[in-house]
Amino acid sequence: MQVLPNGLKLLPGFLSRSEQEDLLEEVRAKAAIAPLFVPKMPRTGKPMSVRMTNFGSLGWVTDKEKGYRYQPTHPETGDPWPDIPVKLLEIWEEHANYEKPPEACLVNYYEPDAKMGLHQDRDEEDFDAPVLSISLGDRCLFRYGGKNRNDPTKSFKLESGDVMLLSGASRLIFHGVDRIYPGTSTLLKREGRINLTLRRVTR
Ligand code: SIN
Ligand code: MN
């Protein structure tokens, strides 16, 4: 495990190719039941460039009217989210250092030109639990700073199979994805990147 100066933890190449393939297959099957949707920014309704879905008892959604929140059902189908893949629960158990299981697995799908602006993950009740993220598919340029929006930032590349943890001092740091490098992984059938983020929402 690598620990960056601000406490951000990285497990580069944590998942083998075959583990990535198995996980991807499971994500695809579950996303067929809970289809990707276009998240919209609070108030403006501006669409984000990523598409999203969730697994677990709670899923993170956002739209113009009600903004950022967690809810137990898919915003378009109205159905409960599919269960979190067991493999992900095992990774959490092993590395989250937190007694309760995650409730949400946010699935972000990045087309080659998608990105995610700097933000904090702070819609959860419990910041003692880490945010555990897994990358699949094309490489991306991940940017992180400090707890204030204006703190200086650094960037590094996240690769398919990497696991990252925002925990302790790094739990509330600003972070985002500057860009995807299309065609840098053969895992997905086409160009793009999937990020899976496990979170504990309630105490
Ligand atoms: C996120 O912060 O929700 C996603 C980060 C990533 O795609 O690596
Ligand atoms: Mn985030």
Image: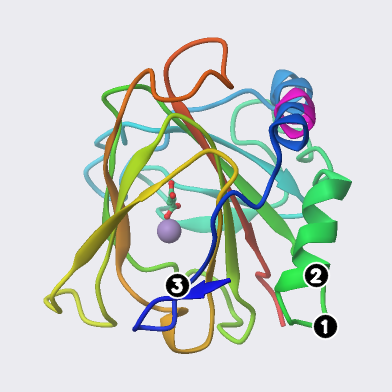
Tell me the amino acid under the disc marked 2: Glu
Residue 130 position (above or below residue 79): below
Mark 1 highlights which residue? 99
Residue plotted at (71% across, 22% down): 28
- The reply to whether dot 2 and dot 3 touch (C-beta < 8 Å) is no
Tell me the amino acid under the disc marked 1: Glu
Magenta stretch: give its range.
Answer: 22-27
Distance between mark 3 and mark 1 Cα atoms? 20 Å
Q: Nearer the viewer, mark 2 or mark 3?
A: 2
On whether ligand 1 comes within 8 Å of the CB at mark 2, the answer is: no
Q: Is residue 26 magenta?
A: yes
Residue plotted at (26% across, 80% down): 146
- The reply to whether dot 1 and dot 2 touch (C-beta < 8 Å) is no
Q: What numbered label is drawn on residue 122?
A: 3
Please tell me whether mark 2 sits on a helix, a strand or a loop.
helix
Q: Position of residue 98 (x, y in %)?
A: 75, 82
Please tell me whether mark 3 sits on a helix, a strand or a loop.
loop
Distance between mark 1 and mark 2 Cα atoms? 11 Å
Residue plotted at (43% across, 29% down): 138
Closer to us: 63 or 81 = 81
| First in residue order: circle 2 vs circle 3 | 2
Tell me the amino acid under the disc marked 3: Arg
Mark 2 highlights which residue? 94
Q: Is residue 90 magenta?
A: no
Q: Is residue 108 left or right of residue 144?
A: right
